[in-house]
Image (cartoon, rainbow, N blue to C red):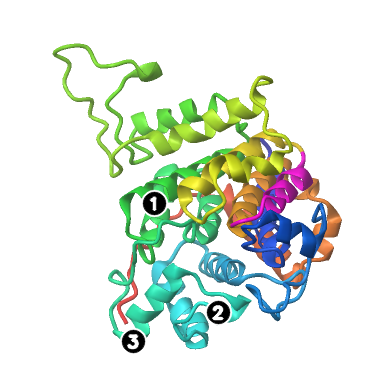
Amino acid sequence: MSHTVIQERAAGAIIGALIGDALALGPHWYYNLAELRRDYGEWITTYTDPKPGRYHSGRKAGQLSQAGIILTLMLRSLVECGKYNEADFCRRLDEELFPLLDGTPMNGPGGYTSQSIRHAWRCRVEQKLPWGKAGGHADTTEAIERTLAIAVRYAFQPAELAIAVANNTRLTQIDDTVISMTVAYAAVLSMLVQGHALDAALSGKLMELVKTGKLPFHAVTFDDLQPPRPGDPDPPRAGRFASPDALLTPSYMAQAAADAAIRIEPAWKVSIVYGMPCAIYHQLPAAYYLAARFRNDFESAVLHAVNGGGQNLARAILTGALAGAQVGLSGIPQRFIDGLEDAEILMSLAKSLATQAGGAALPVDHEICRN
């Protein structure tokens, strides 16, 4: 694949995520779909203002939520450092985000602060704890929403990707299952940036990376999930994470999307099938399904993510990145870019990161912020 196509896919993933975030800003967290339709009509097609008194109230159509703002901080760090530098990213949180928070949900840049970030704020600001002791147990996709930029940066360096994403996730989320699912999503996104399809074969390709030690997942079974033979030693593939199941999910979702006997109609009802809440185990199957079903149609993928209600903002970010990586930047409708606030700045960051994605390998800086 040419360097130009790689850049297209890498930039498409970043801009796709940011567009997904902004599209869901207005209709975020409607668990009553009748109320969602009452406030926004039968089908949301573009950026909208949040309604007074609801989440993100006061923000305007085309603006980012706090998740998008933190993703932008990550982009700036990666672009300016030329690699993942944990100390630099931590400094940005300490200096640019945390002074604007007060520990309550309905406050801060973007109009709402997530559970994970509130916990980290309390640890850092109120308790004066070092980074490394600020992570909490929220089971959300909060870390994916920023580490997807790391996945793009290290799309051709799976071992470095896994280390950097796991370490960055651990800053705010310390549950091992959440970390493993976050790393798995990053690995999937990196494969799409490389040009692989989100299909039934993708999980097998990811498992090959496990077998070669490039992805830190444990695998006791052999090829095609066959059991070991009696007397065989434990395969030397024990990894950081207990099982490879998070790497198997995307291909199952892709098979479901391609199977004519399995229909979710309309596709936005994926939120009902897999669940509307925030937890990572609700969000990832829905995002994989939509991105596989609409692999050549960014607009349909992201709008079905938004119109499904519930935690549609996370669903749209995750779907937007996967769909954007598949269609490339040029495959994203221009109206979504035109309506995004600060689009020129965000496009510049996305393109700058994209130029790094297929470049020479750089070491990951694991220095931890100490203060």
Q: Is residue 130 left or right of residue 45?
A: left
Q: Is residue 355 or residue 191 the one in the foreground?
A: 191
Q: Is residue 83 on the magenta stretch?
A: no
Q: Position of residue 129 (x, y in %)?
A: 28, 80
Q: Is residue 274 above or below residue 20?
A: above
* Residue at 57% in and 65% down: 71
Q: Is residue 131 left or right of residue 50?
A: left
Q: Position of residue 235 (x, y in %)?
A: 23, 25
* Residue at 61% in and 78% down: 111
Counting residues from the start of the chain, the first of labels 3 and 1 encountered is 3
Q: CA distance from mark 3 to mark 1?
A: 25 Å
Q: Secondary structure at mark 3?
A: helix
Tell me which segment is drawn in magenta: 297-310
Residue designated by label 2: 106
Residue type marked 2: Met
- Which secondary structure dominates the residues rendered in magenta? helix
* Residue at 80% in and 58% down: 336
Q: Does any portion of residue 155 appear in the rendered image? A: no
Residue type marked 3: Glu
Q: Is residue 305 on the magenta stretch?
A: yes
Residue type marked 1: Val
Q: Position of residue 232 (x, y in %)?
A: 17, 16
* Residue at 71% in and 49% down: 302
Dot 3: within a 10 Å radius of its alpha carbon, few (fewer than 14), some, or many (20 or more) residues? few
Residue designated by label 3: 126
Q: Is residue 308 or residue 164 the one in the foreground?
A: 308
Q: CA distance from mark 3 to mark 2?
A: 18 Å
Displayed quadrant of residue 214: top left
Q: Quadrant of the C terminus?
A: bottom left
Residue designated by label 1: 178
In this view, the residue farthest toward the left is: 231
Q: Quadrant of the N terminus?
A: top right
